[in-house]
Each structure stands twice: as structure tokens, then as C-alpha cells.
Amino acid sequence: MVPLGDVLQAEGWTVSIAQLAGHGTSPTELARTRWQDWVASARAAYADLRRRNSRTAIVGLSMGGALALYLAATEGTDAVIAISTPVRVRPLIAGAARIVSRLMPLAPVVVRLSPRDPIARQYRSPYTKIPLGATEELSALLEAAMRSLPSLRAPLLVVQGRRDWVIPKDSGPEILARATHTPGRILWLRRSGHVATLDRDREVLFDEVKGFLRDSLMGA
């Protein structure tokens, strides 16, 4: 999310990037957290932002998109953007997580989320593994986020890459279908995979985000 945050800051927006509990540390630390801890971290960062600004938006990528939707629905906001956001963990992974995490809490899932654009790879996280227990917590977070969508009232932009193999292809449309009480639209990125903020269509994404925020927060 750092490149997008940098772009928005350059445009004059106040940007706050939440440090989620257990993230940016180690798989061991991540395994000790629950999805409610991630929500609490995001809620604290958002509360601080709201104290300093009269109008706010919440933006998230992947799991962060689910957090953005959940916070927007439960806390309220003026706009929300969910990028590459899954509606569920794939059944095979979810089933394995439930079984294995009880026997081996730190059993890793190997992930490789490399952007297609070689220039953007400098922003990649050094982590290549997440504990299966965290996958189970992610599944619980996604369930909570999807249940909250009928309560969402803020304008919604959903973004999904056509080459995203990580999340189900119907994720974006399903999010819009569940958000029944708010205006929403989906932006498809033709050349991008899961980490859309770093991929080949990132300039398209940045321009769309800037326009959406101007329309939603400034009415122009």
C-alpha cells in the first residue's frame, strides 16, 4: 500500500497506514494474533485519522480490503475502496488450516505474490510464508466482513485484477451484490494480478482512486 499512499500524499491527502497486530514482525508473532486484533489495530489508526479530518475514506488491499469493508460498515466513513479483496478463503486451504493449525500452529503456507512489473518488485514484502492458523483467522475475518456489507452506506469502489489467481474470480461482483444499500462499482485491471498497487496497471489504479476520492469526499 505504500506506493498508493505516497501518490495520495503527493496530491495533498492526509494518509495513515495502520500497522496491524502481528504483521511486519514474524510468522510466530502473527500466529499469536486473532482477526479481532487486526480489526483493533485498524480501528485505532482510523479513529486517529478521524480526529484530525472532517471527511475520511478507508482503503485496503487483499485482507486489508476486508478490514476496510468491515470498518466502513461498523464505524462509518465517507468512502471505501477494497482492492483485490477475497470474499472467502478457498475451501481446500480453509479445510487444511482448520485441521493442521490445531496440530502444528506454525505450519507454513508458502505464498509467492510477485508483481508482474519488475520495477515494482522493490516494494515486495520479504515474507514468503504465513502460518496456517492465520489463514483460519483470515477466513473468520472475511465472514465477518461479508456479513457486515448490508450495513455499509459509504460509496464503494471495488478493484480486481483480471490475472489475480489468489482470490475467487467472483469476489468483486459478490462484494457489490452484498453491499445493497450503497452506490458501488467495480474496476477491472486487465494486466494485474493480486498485488494490484504494484502491478502493471498501477497508474490506472492510482488515477481511478484519486478521482473516486475527489468525487466522494470533495463532491467535485
Image: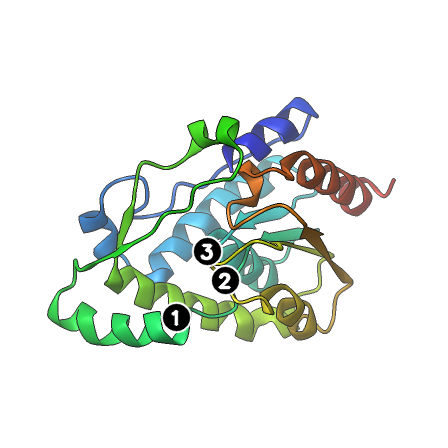
Q: Mark 1 belongs to which amino acid?
A: Ala
Q: Name the mark nearer the viewer: 2 or 1.
A: 2
Of label 3 and label 2, which has the lower sequence position? 3
- Mark 1 is surrounded, within 10 Å at the Cα level, by few (under 14), some (14 to 19) or many (20 or more) other residues, namely some
Up-down: is 59 above or below 12? below
Q: Tell me how far mark 2 sits from mark 1, CA to CA.
A: 16 Å
The residue where tag 1 is placed is: 140
The residue where tag 2 is placed is: 167
The way the protein has been coloured in the rendering is: rainbow
Q: Position of residue 114 (x, y in %)?
A: 43, 41
Circle 2/circle 1 CB separation < 8 Å: no
Q: Tell me how far mark 3 sits from mark 2, CA to CA.
A: 11 Å
> Foreground residue, 71 or 60?
60
Up-down: is 204 above or below 38? above
Q: Position of residue 4 (x, y in %)?
A: 59, 34
Q: Residue furthest right?
A: 220
Give the SS element for disc 2.
loop
Give the SS element for disc 1.
helix
- Mark 2 is surrounded, within 10 Å at the Cα level, by few (under 14), some (14 to 19) or many (20 or more) other residues, namely many
The residue where tag 3 is placed is: 63
Of label 3 and label 1, which has the lower sequence position? 3
Q: Position of residue 129 (x, y in %)?
A: 27, 49
Give the SS element for disc 3.
helix
Q: Position of residue 33 (x, y in %)?
A: 27, 56
Mark carried by residue 126: none
Q: Mark 2 belongs to which amino acid?
A: Ile
Circle 3/circle 2 CB separation < 8 Å: no
Left or right: 157 in relation to 82: right
> Foreground residue, 137 or 77?
137
Residue under the image location 65 percent in, 39 percent down: 201
